[in-house]
Image: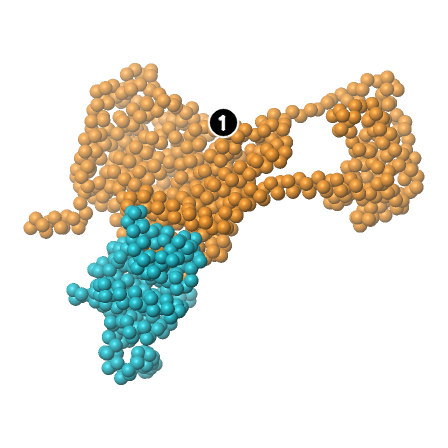
Amino acid sequence: MRAMDIVVADKLVKTFPTTDGGEKRAVDGLSFVVGEGRIYGLLGPNGAGKTTTLRLLSGLMTPTSGTATLAGYDVATQPEQVKRVLGFLTANTGLYQRLSARELLVYFAQLHGMDRSHAEQRAMFLIQRLGIESFAGLRCGALSTGQKQRVSIARALVADPPILIMDEPTLGLDVLSNRVILEFIVRERDAGKTIILSTHYLDEAETMCDKIGLLHDGRLVAEGDLQTLREMSGEERLSNIFLKLIRADESVGVLPV
Amino acid sequence: MRFDQRIRMIYGKELVDILRDHRTLIAMIVVPIVLYPLLMLGSVQAVSYQAAAMEEEVLIVGVVNEAQRGSLLNLIEADRTALEQRRTTLDSESEEAKGLPKPIDPDKLHVEVVGSVEDIDRRVRERSIHIGVVFDRDMLVNAPDMQNHVDLRHDKEDVRSDAAERRLGEMIDRVRDQTNTERKAQARLPATFDEPFVVTATDLSSPPSILGQVLPLILVLMTITGAIYPAIDLTAGERERGTLESLMVCPIPVIDLIVGKFLVVTTVAIMGAALNLGSVTATVYFGGFSKMLASGGGRVPVGTMVFILLSLIPFAVLMSAIMIAVCSFARTFKEAQNYVTPVILAVLIPGGIAALPATRLEGVMLVMPVGNMVLLARDLLLGANVPAAAVVMVLLSTTLYAGAAVAIAASVFGRESVVFCDAASLGSMFQRRLIRPSERPSVSMVLLFVALLFPVWFFIQGALSPGAGEDASALLYAAGWLMPLLFVVAPVGVLAYWKVRVGRSLALRAPAWRYVVAAILIGLSAWAPAYEIDVLQQRLMGVPEALVQSSEAMAATLKAMPLVHVLVVIAVVPAVCEELLFRGFLLGGVGGEVGRWGGIIVSAAVFGVFHFYLFRFVVTTGLGIVMAYLCWQSRSIVPGMIVHVLHNGLGVLSVVRQDWVLRFGLSGESESSDWAHLPPATLVCGVGLFVIGLALARHRSATGVEYAMRAIAET
């Protein structure tokens, strides 16, 4: 590990038992590193293992084999420490419908060990930062999708963690909300945070990510910045690069060896 | 943030969350406040309306011929005339006048000549007539030496036929009584002539007896109902709404979350029970139902209601813990509901057994989950004399079960296979090939094990205990065989299945010498403080007669057995088995999770509860604390075993070889006094050795890794 690599995944494997008694390898020997203050994008088709990878990194799931460390803490053996350096935005984030956005943020700040007044200050700060003021007093059940997503992001940031893991942060958002959130992510990166995100939107990845990992069937089929991927595939646009590399991986899979 | 602050914070949030939910409010407030009065008023109205409606209906009677029709009408007329005469002699405002039965109204009577008896029967079954009246002769006779037979042919399953039988039967009884009275008057016989016996039954039940039987059942059901919704919402609901994942990435122990949620469910269940109770009470008081509930029309004192509510609290605690544990397995609301239904039925079985009037709060019922609480509530409510020891046993065993349920919830809630239903099935939690090896057992595993073992062990002891005058040695030998199986083989099997390192988790390793010395000192001297505590307890609360008798019976048995056998079954086997279970398995599991003192206190309290007698609880728990402390400090099971074997061995010898005790002057000041204090010199020596032993163990033994680190540092 280089001094700058704050997230290190080493030969991560996650298998799930199947109903017929066998097992399915959702993540299959995944290794990558993310430098401090970078945005790392995990791209891949549905079922490629993106969400499982992010859950492994956040300590929500324990790897079947291999290791991952966040800021030097092992996700399998030091989950408490990992949770202290991590903000995690899940794909289908639910909010407590019957709490207001402000109450929710204060609660999560307290869950991270802050006392009440400190937690209220932090919630106030995030409410202003993410433009939540106008609906901070409304119950979360009454918010629009875009408003909910902003509250979710504020929740992930509540402990001001150095590492942010975001699973599909812009899924289902309109153009305006999308823009607000993407700008926010870039701003957080510029402020020194390390961000790992998964996305389906290739143009977002193209403009935002410092490094992209292309995931297929639980394996990393290509990795690098946009320029490296262009050279690898001979394609200009990320969408074309994506298709070409995935197809190449699939054709390798069926070739006799 | 401290544990209690975290719990308070989680509790506050969850309570606000659940109370803002309309469904909770409807179930908790609207249902009891609106539904109960409506149900009670409505059902009473419906019953009285139906009774009134039947009175208004035309009574259709079938007879075999015209002559018998005439006979029946004559009887009805005779009854009506007699009743009218009675009415004119009475003051119309008097109670007796109001209580006079109503004669059958000829306008609401239709007597039909049907033909044969077979035809009558067919018509009754077809329900085209209500009843058939068949006399044995066409014309009735009124002669002292002759009898008239009347057959009322009816269908008891048909409400109208049944009512017709009652009305006609009562009418004929009245005519018969009237005829009897007239005949006795004619013959100048006294009214008591044909009544050599008058039987009255006096009901001695206290006024709230009906209430005592009905209310606990309603309230038990309402408490369960109150716990269900919040338990599902706060566990499976969390998963279904997608908030569980964000919760699980917070650096907060799962046990804190579960305890906070459990307290909210308990609060809501108790609030629900209180509101239900209040609503029932108000309906009874203001709806004019006092007579229905409290016999004699007396009002049930408010104090009784408060008492019922208090007795419901431990029940609410246990039910909330069970509900939280069950719902923690569920991934969706629907799944949780599916799990909850059989649990409610399972809970109602012991509840139902306890509700049987013949069931008593004794023996195995003392430790039957749920059943013991229902029995306790019933007995307290009926004013029965419940021994304090029974109350303590019920509360302690309930606490043990509730604790195990909360621990299970904590170990299940937030598990990978529960958080992500797409990831793994629930069954995967129990498949051995998927279980990861671990160093020590989990809290839920050890608490669940002892919670299951407890009633089994209690039952075995009860089943084996000898009756008066029987030999107790069979119990001792059987316990000597069963204890290794239940206390050692069973937990080791559980550990092995769950791939827990047996040696490490049972603290099977040689201790350092100073702990052995400490254990010998404590083992030889612990009887002194233990004896003094016994004396204090005896002075404060006396010794239960049952304990005195069983101790005497046991002493007689021990004296009759070979000394070596006695030492093996009383000292060696319990020392080895109980230490492995309580100081190895239980302390390892609990202490590993909640730390030294939490582990020591829980394991010692459970050790105390397992010895059943309340009188022994303080001393047993105290010794449990000492032995657990030694085990924790030395990281070895051996010192505890040494203390245990020495303490029990000395206890046995003091009973079997009383001459030795007297020779050493160790007993009380005088031989005649059973409960005298120890001689001061003996007491000082005993307590002194005990304290020195504890002091020797005050430094904790280093682990192998720590030794290695120290060795490296020294070189």
Location of residue B417 by image quarter? bottom left
- Judge whether B166 appears above or below B434 on screen: above
Q: Residue at x 45, y 47 (%)?
A: B19
Q: Amino acid at mark 1?
A: Asn
User: Among all residues in the image, which is located at the extreme front?
Assistant: A134
- B548 w.r.t. A233: above or below: above
B36 left or right of A189 in image: right
- Tell me what residue is drawn at x 23 percent, y 19 percent: B680
Element at badge 1?
Answer: loop
Horizontally, residue B636 falls left or right of residue B114, namely left
Q: In terms of image quadrants, where is residue B187?
A: top right
| Residue with the most extreme bottom position | A234
* Chain of the residue on which disc 1 is drawn: B
Asked if B649 appears above or below B488 in the picture, the reply is above
Q: Nearer the viewer, residue B164 or B52?
A: B52
- Residue plotted at (52% across, 33% down): B305
- Asked if residue B677 can be seen in this view, the reply is yes
Q: Please state, as top left, top right, bottom left or bottom right, where the N terminus of chain B lies in the image.
A: top left
* Residue holding disc 1: B385
Q: Which chain is orange in the picture? A: B
**Residue B407 visible in the snapshot:** no
Residue B509 picture location, percent across and down: 22, 45
Residue A44: give x, y in percent of width and height. 33, 73
Image spot of residue B577 (x, y percent):
32, 41
Q: Position of residue A204 (x, y in %)?
A: 32, 73
Q: Nearer the viewer, residue B172 or B137?
A: B172
Answer above or below: position of B665 versus A60: above
Q: Residue at x 38, y 23 (%)?
A: B541
In the image, which lettered chain appears cyan? A
